[in-house]
Image (cartoon, grey):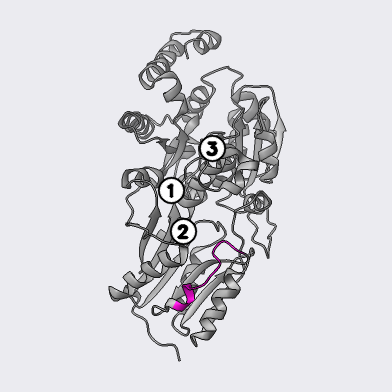
Amino acid sequence: MDEPLDTSRQRLLVFARFPEAGKTKTRLIPALGAEGAANLHAQMIRRSMHTASRLSCTTVELHHDGGTARNWHTLLRRAANLRPQSEGDLGTRMRTAFDRSFTRGDKAVVVIGTDCPFLQRRDLSEAFDHLRRHDMVIGPAADGGYYLLGLRRLVPRVFENIDWGGADVLAQTLARAADAGLSVMRMCVLRDIDTPDDLAAFASGRSSQLSIERPPYLSVIIAARNEEQHIAATIASARDRSDAQIIVVDGGSQDRTCEITRAMGAQVLESPAGRAAQMNLGASKATGKVLVFLHGDTTLPPGYAAQVRSVLRRSGTIAGGFRLHIDGGERRFRLIEFMANLRSRTVGLPYGDQALFVCRDRFHALGEFSDMPVMEDYEWIRRARKHGRIGIASASVTTSARRWRQRGAFRLTVAHQAMIVGYHLGASPTRLASWR
């Protein structure tokens, strides 16, 4: 018979290192570059924390290495229960965290990292259920380590004399558990994302064991040009739904954008430069019921597919977009976000960097993006708005702050507003493009 556990005394510990270019996910740098590896790492952290936050009746703590509280809140776009990791090797840090939790009276404690994007909420629930019958639960990783460890009480031995980072972490941990006389439940094998060989599995939504083929609900069309620093994270964010069709339409990149896209398992189409032409080409090849148009330096929020479905089900809604978040901690970005989100909510005019989405049949009925060097998103959303409501999802996409940093936040904001005024006064798109 299962031994009852007080679910109010369950705690999930998420161990994460703050993403810094050149210091995190270093084995991915040859494939993605230092910035690209760090951006992918950031996306994996957000995804892991989203999965953890959906677990009911469980306290979630983020045990962090590096970064300030402000850094983490900006990265996650929300407040988090932060705890700094202790000093020492990984075993010492985990043992200290478990000890602290059990000292506070917790009855079941599980620790996970942020390297396994295949981990789902049901896996976390299953881990806590196993702790009703077993002293320890462990999730084996395909590389010989583990992606999850759960205990009902502190057992220091399972953290001692382990070759952390080696290929025998799982075997050594199981041996220590056997020496301690623990009953152990092993979960299914999943794959961490640490090396270039792991990237295609991540992008295709496959664990090391199983791939499920099904018709796509979503086609995510990514317009990209020279986005080698961001494209891996952008593709990874779109794989939040494993059956999404991902099409990267490249506009003549001179860097490794196409190479990285193929390594991530996404489809590549080549197009003349220009977002309108790129997005229209992607839409013509898409097979999903719903189209999501995404910029190459923008990531979708975890759980985005459910948000898209919810918005499009609202009565009278013909298309939609997300709220905007700019990837930077400066206060000026919060003001820009506020104004963009106010505009979107009050007058139904999200811009292209807010990941516009629409049912594929409706997109073709409304007509494709006009062949314009700028304002193609503005023109299309105004056209769509004549036929129905433009819904705004409650979650935010995250877009790179580089444009505002390179050109100046004030200057770029004024230029955008001037372009809108010029557009309504009849200025040609070519002239408007020169104002950017």
Label 3 vs 2, first from the N-terminus: 3
Q: Residue furthest bottom?
A: 1
What amino acid type is highlighted by mark number 3?
A: Glu
Mark 2 closeness class: few <14, some 14–19, many ≥20 residues within 10 Å: some
Label pair 3/2, CB-CB below 8 angstroms: no
Of 353 and 35, nearer the camera is 35
Image position, residue 54 (x, y; %): 42, 61
Label 3 vs 1, first from the N-terminus: 1
Q: Which residues are magenta?
A: 157-166
Element carrying mark 1: loop
Using the numbered discs, state the Cα–Cα distance from disc 3 to disc 2 in whole angstroms.
25 Å
Using the numbered discs, state the Cα–Cα distance from disc 1 to disc 2 in whole angstroms.
18 Å
What amino acid type is highlighted by mark number 1?
A: Phe
Q: Which residue is located at x 65 percent, y 58 percent? A: 206
Residue that carries the numbered disc 3 in the rendered image:
35
Mark 3 closeness class: few <14, some 14–19, many ≥20 residues within 10 Å: some
